[in-house]
Image (cartoon, grey):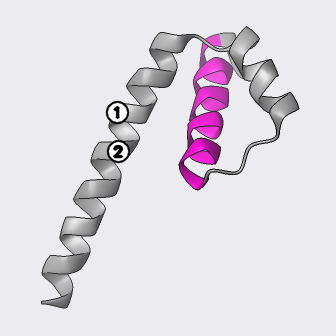
Amino acid sequence: MSASPNKTAWLSTLVAVLWGFLGVRRNSDYQQDVQRLNPLHIMLVGIVMTFLFVAGLMLLVTWIT
């Protein structure tokens, strides 16, 4: 059973955004992403991941204090 194209596209977008968060992305991979991924998907995943990161930091600080 193979994953649907839509699910694969979202997974590829998530992986690209996570690598972007780390700041380590090969130029060849970046060029492939530019041609293959939807910019709207990248923005949505980036916003959601930023929200989750900030919420995680807030929970960590609350738990520590």
The question of residue 14 being in magenta is answered with: yes
Q: Residue at x 65, y 14 (%)?
A: 37
Confirm whether residue 1 shows in the render: no
Measured along the vertical axis of the image, is residue 25 above or below residue 30?
Answer: below
CB under 8 Å between callouts 1 and 2?
A: yes
Q: Residue at x 64, y 39 (%)?
A: 15
Number of other residues with Cα within 10 Å of mark 1, as a class: few under 14, some 14 to 19, many 20 or more:
few
> Which image quadrant: the N terminus?
top right
- What is the x, y in percent for residue 38? 58, 10
- What is the x, y in percent for residue 48? 34, 36
- What is the x, y in percent for residue 8? 68, 22
Measured along the vertical axis of the image, is residue 48 above or below residue 41?
Answer: below
Q: Secondary structure at mark 1?
A: helix
> Which image quadrant: the C terminus?
bottom left
Horizontal side, residue 43 vs residue 63: left or right: right
Which one is in front, 29 or 8? Answer: 29
Of all residues, the one furthest to the bottom in this rendering is 65
- The span shown in magenta is 6-22
Tell me the kind of residue under disc 2.
Answer: Thr
Q: Residue at x 20, y 89 (%)?
A: 64
Disc on res. 50: 2
Disc on res. 47: 1
- What is the x, y in percent for residue 55? 23, 57
The question of residue 20 being in magenta is answered with: yes
Disc on res. 12: none
Q: Secondary structure at mark 2?
A: helix
Confirm whether residue 39 shows in the render: yes
Tell me the kind of residue under disc 1.
Answer: Ile
